[in-house]
Image: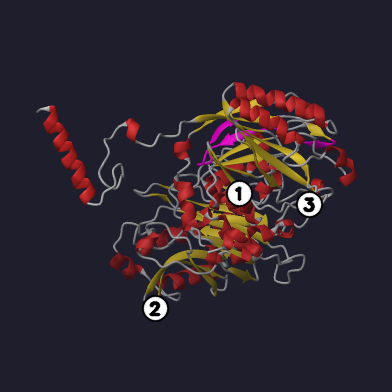
Amino acid sequence: MSMKKNIILFLLFISVLILSGCEIGSTDSFAKPHNQNNQKKKAEPFEVASIQFNPILNEREKNITELLKITEEALTKGAKLVVAPEMSTTGYDYANREAIRPFVDTIPGKTTDAFVKLAKKYDAYIVFGMAEVENETGMYYNSAALVGPEGYIGKYRKTQMWETEMHWAAWGDLGVPVFDTKIGKIAINICMDSAYYETARLAGIKGADILAFPTNSSAQTISALPARAQQNGMYIISANRSNTENGFHMVGGSAIWSPEGKKLAEASVVMNESQDVDEPTITYATIDPQLFDNKNKEGLKNRRPELYKEIVHYVAPWDYTKNTTSHEVVAAALQYEPIIGDKEKNKEKIIKLVKEAKKQNNDLNLVVLPELSLTGPVDGKRKKEIEALAEDTQGETARFIADIAKEYRVSIVYGFIEKENKSLYNSAQLVSSSGETIGKYQKTHLNKFDKKWAEAGSTLPVFESKELGRIGVLLGEDAQYPEASGVLAVKRADIIAIPSAWHGEFGGAMEINKELSVNEYPEGSMVTWDAVAIGAQAYTVIANYIGTDRDYQGRSSLYTLDPLYGLDQPVVASEDEEEALVVKFNTLQSDAWFNQEQLILSRRTPNFVPLVEE
């Protein structure tokens, strides 16, 4: 074909495009060739660094000089984001405003200017904790700054303070900003913030990819980080200290966590003062931007803010609805392989296991059964088949459970397919030892299988039991949403029961360093369930299935309020054995350093309003 004919054909092609209204070069007009040049360049993985740095109290200039030096070392090794500890320019333990006055600085200011020079030189980002003064008001804050190649980017002021800094600092008033950078969306929390799921959640709902976490932790706050990573689908980079200051020991263990709550890297853990490590440690890991979009972050779309309004309530210091009497509870979580759709066979299994539990401890007073206790999960069934198994609240299952409760003198939490008018629900009921129904809960956070047949519930109730205190109920996937257990905490649940049908579709194994917990977590401990108990400060009993072709993973459990500092001990069943896991606890721990009362009194609820906006 001649050059002239080629030109004519090309002009005719262009004319057709113009006449048809197409814009040349528009991806809506015609497909571009599938090659590297015409596709958006994929973001490449990059290195991040956590600096386990130990500042000297009252030596700001020396601390800054040393921190700049160790930060530059991390940057020369290729780190594109470096995170340093809380109060890393001054040290932490200041008695009052007068004590810290000589060491505060504005943000931005002289301190941030020094770190900006490094960030520009190495085309990287740096987060570090420092004491901030606001010139306009003269107020001091426990803050952290973010700087990058473009200069000073932004700051965060600690939302949930610990007692020490309350003597000199004001509560953070900036919310949890998320900063859009070349390497991803970065948010910051500081230390005690992680004891409250809300602060990380505020970053999560704004789409944070990375949470920088400066801390001075003795164990509690760094132990919460795998749950915070999972709950929000974001990387977390924590930077802790590894020495002792004025009698307060910080345990190191600076770590980087994946959006799945997997530990990517960790610095040494130093559990007592005799092992103090004053020298800085740099811990590196790789972050893959392709994982910024992940199933855990996607799950945030299934939040139900209309149900969470109570989390902004501050019912303190007075709350006349709370229980003030501790109850001794002997609970059994029943774990068995369900015969799908066969109520009679499942009844036999339940009776056998209740007998076993009663034999283990005759004082048994609470039994928790798995989700959809008599039918088993109905994921593969058609809606008509499910309707045939459905009952009202006084149906066959309710009568069977009431009989068992009366015979063995136990309260029971069980699940069933509820038919209410023309709707079906994945429901649970609490029955007293006298066989009376105390309350009903309809699952509020449905999984993809539930949605094929069930309507979602519309409340998160707490039930009053004369024998046991105040009990909240969640079902299965509800546990993924910390707001749900958060509402139960505000309503002062002493116990949370979770009938479940879990086969590994959410959560994951506990990967915190075993040294961090005085009472070691058992093998098979699951992050999501532990986060419910610690986050709500309510003893949490989970009953799960084993076996079937869905491979239900057992691990029925008791999760407790504070194994980290030795108050109590989680207990976990096997992955594959039918058993009655019998546990014992007292519901209220009024003398503990941290308990539900302290949790409720210390929550900074005005900051949580974005979590309930619909």
State which mark lies toward you, 2 or 1: 1
Q: Main secondary structure of the magenta part?
A: loop
Q: Residue furthest front?
A: 4
Q: Earlier in the sequence, mark 3 or mark 1?
A: 3
| 543 sits to left or right of 11 | right
Q: Which residue is mark 2?
A: 421
Residue at the spot of label 1:
200
Residue 239, quarter of the rendered image: top right
Q: Are marks 2 and 3 in contact (CB under 8 Å)?
A: no
Q: Is residue 54 above or below residue 450?
A: above
Q: Choose the circle earlier in sequence order: 2 or 3.
A: 3
Amino acid type at circle 2 is Asn
Mark 1, secondary structure of its residue: helix
Can you identify the residue that label 3 sits on?
Answer: 170
Q: Quadrant of residue 72?
A: top right
Per the rendering, the mark at residue 251 is: none
Q: Amino acid at mark 3?
A: Ala
Q: Residue furthest right?
A: 98
Disc 3 to disc 1, how far (Cα)? 20 Å
Residue at point 48%, 31% (across, down):
45
Q: Which residues are magenta?
A: 246-268
How far is the residue under mark 2 from the one under mark 1?
Answer: 40 Å
